[in-house]
Amino acid sequence: MPNYWLMKSEPDAFSIDDLADMQVSPWDGVRNYQARNFMKDMQVGDLVFFYHSSCKPAGIVGVAKVVKEAYPDHTSWDPNSPYYDAKSTPQNPRWFMVDLAFVEKWPRLVTLAELKADALLAELPLVKKGSRLSIMPINKAHWEHIIKTY
DNA sequence: GCCAACGTTGGC
DNA sequence: GCCAACGTTGGC
């Protein structure tokens, strides 16, 4: 029984097309404790809404699947990486990543505005005011509603 | 580019 | 441990 998630990425940095090209990619660069903790909860086979943020329009563009559970994010101890964090070391890693596999790109982007306008999704963390989490759990009812409706 | 919301840092 | 200052996110 898979769990469901939503993960945000800026398409300029990493888009669903990039994932489609690579088929499998690590999800690195997460530097938020709450998001990290959610990643640690992910299991192989979990399904993920791929969300494009900071673009016009923002929204869900497709689906990915977890193929490797959380392991240390090596970019955190690479001084040349934009994601470098001096407090993270190979001996004592602070940040983690998972590997995702491409599943499907949707024929169209489902916009944040649509999701906000959907009364059945009022409790979706994504549409809550001030939500800045880049990774969040999605319950089964919400997941199935979104898959069915859009 | 603006700004609201939120997370993190650091002085005390 | 509190909280003000600062930085970041992310929609518009």
Image (cartoon, coloured by chain):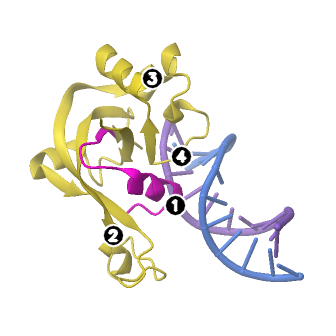
Chain colours: A yellow, B blue, C purple
Q: Nearer the viewer, mark 3 or mark 2?
A: 2
Circle 1: is it few (<14), some (14-19), or many (20+) Cα within 10 Å? few
At horizontal 34% and vertical 32% (from top left) the residue drawn is: A60
Residue range of the region highlighted in magenta in the rendering: A29-50
Q: Nearer the viewer, mark 2 or mark 4?
A: 2
Residue C7 is left or right of residue A52, and the answer is right
Do the residues under discs 2 and 4 have CB atoms within 8 angstroms?
Answer: no
Amino acid tagged 1? Tyr
Q: Per the image, is A81 magenta?
A: no
Residue A144 is left or right of residue A120, and the answer is left
- Dividing the picture into quadrants, the one containing residue A82 is bottom left
Query: Dot 4 lies on which element?
Result: loop
Residue A12 appears in the figure? yes
Q: Per the image, is A40 magenta?
A: yes
Q: Chain of mark 2?
A: A
Q: Nearer the viewer, residue B11 or A57?
A: B11
